[in-house]
Amino acid sequence: MHRYILRRLLLLIPVMLGVSFVVFTIMYFTPGDPAQVMLGERAPKEEVEALREQMGLNDPFHEQYFNFVKNALKGDLGRSLVTKQPVTSELMGRFPATLQLAAAAVLIAVLIGIPIGIISATKQYSVFDMVSMVFALIGVSMPNFWQGLMMILLFSVTLGMLPSGGYGTFRHLILPALTIGTSSAAIITRMTRSSMLEVVRQDYIRTARAKGLKESVVINRHALKNALIPIVTVIGLQFGYLLGGAVLTESIFSWPGVGRLMVDAIRQKDYFVVQGGVLLIALAFSLVNLTVDILYAFLDPRIKAQYK
């Protein structure tokens, strides 16, 4: 198992190199001049050229990329063209807010999605099953930005129960977490139902029922445990996606996360922040996938036996 984890960690190296090359290439060929952005549109050409030379922007592409990777390995992703602060500090200052929002949203999604999916599978074609699947379809189809605006109108403007935006207290977290959590819950509900339906039709489930075991024991101990792998996969993907920054939700609710930082950086042509943000998102997603793969071994002994 330790060898498997080590091998997966080593595979992160080419993944991160590939992501860094793609994002660096895109930003390199993007119209605009970082030196011009830093000095302003009316800056003399001599000053702009001097700053370009100082920043190494006149070097060939391969030299610029090599220096970028070398500095990134040291934790230096450059300085923001707008705030003049280190990009690493900017990202680390925003990442806890994104992590908090993603964790709260996934918790809501799991608490809603898994129980409803289990009940829908065990009561297939019942009224509860049909109603829950309709709501799941609505949840998957509903745009987050529209849902967020509707929740602001209802809970903030009309009822005055919750703040419409901001960060710092539990009350500020409720609306954005519900907005993206309910969308993820719809996906988890559909996957849980599908996976459970496949498992409950297996012979060993019929055998467990024939032994006289309680239905709750059959479902929770035998069926759910064997249906968890695709469910955990979806949960991991949703969590990794949210760690990348729920861009629209963070913008609507003025949540100071990585997603909103990336949007502002793209709008302001803050190239170094965009590069660092994409690398952080790729690293977070890769680590989440690694964690999910490790969980597989604890959920299914057959998987764990492959690495002994």
Image (cartoon, helix red, strand yellow):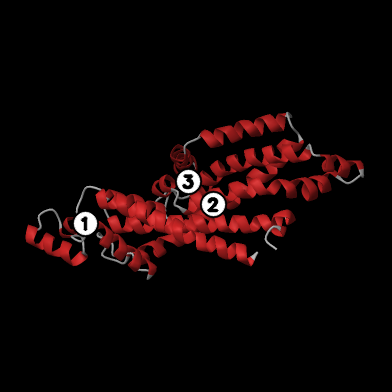
* Crowdedness near tag 2: few (<14), some (14–19) or many (≥20) residues, C-alpha within 10 Å: many
| Apparent side of residue 211 relative to residue 163 in the rendered image (left or right) | right
Q: Which mark lies nearer to you, 2 or 1?
A: 1
Which residue in the protein does label 3 denote? 160
Q: Quadrant of the C terminus?
A: bottom right
The residue depicted at 70 percent of the width and 32 percent of the height is: 129
Q: Amino acid at mark 1?
A: Pro
Residue 168 seen in the figure? no
Q: Earlier in the sequence, mark 3 or mark 2?
A: 3
Q: Amino acid at mark 3?
A: Gly
The residue depicted at 65 percent of the width and 34 percent of the height is: 132
Q: Which one is nearer the viewer's eye here, 252 or 92?
A: 92
Farthest-out residue, right: 211
Q: Mark 3 and mark 2 in contact? Answer it, CB < 8 Å.
A: no
The residue depicted at 45 percent of the width and 50 percent of the height is: 163
Task: Please tell me whether residue 36 is drawn above or below residue 55 in the rendered image.
Answer: above
Q: Which one is nearer the viewer's eye here, 249 or 279?
A: 279
Question: x, y percentage for residue 50?
Answer: 12, 64
The residue depicted at 74 percent of the width and 48 percent of the height is: 226
Q: Which mark lies nearer to you, 3 or 2?
A: 2
Q: Which mark lies nearer to you, 3 or 1?
A: 1
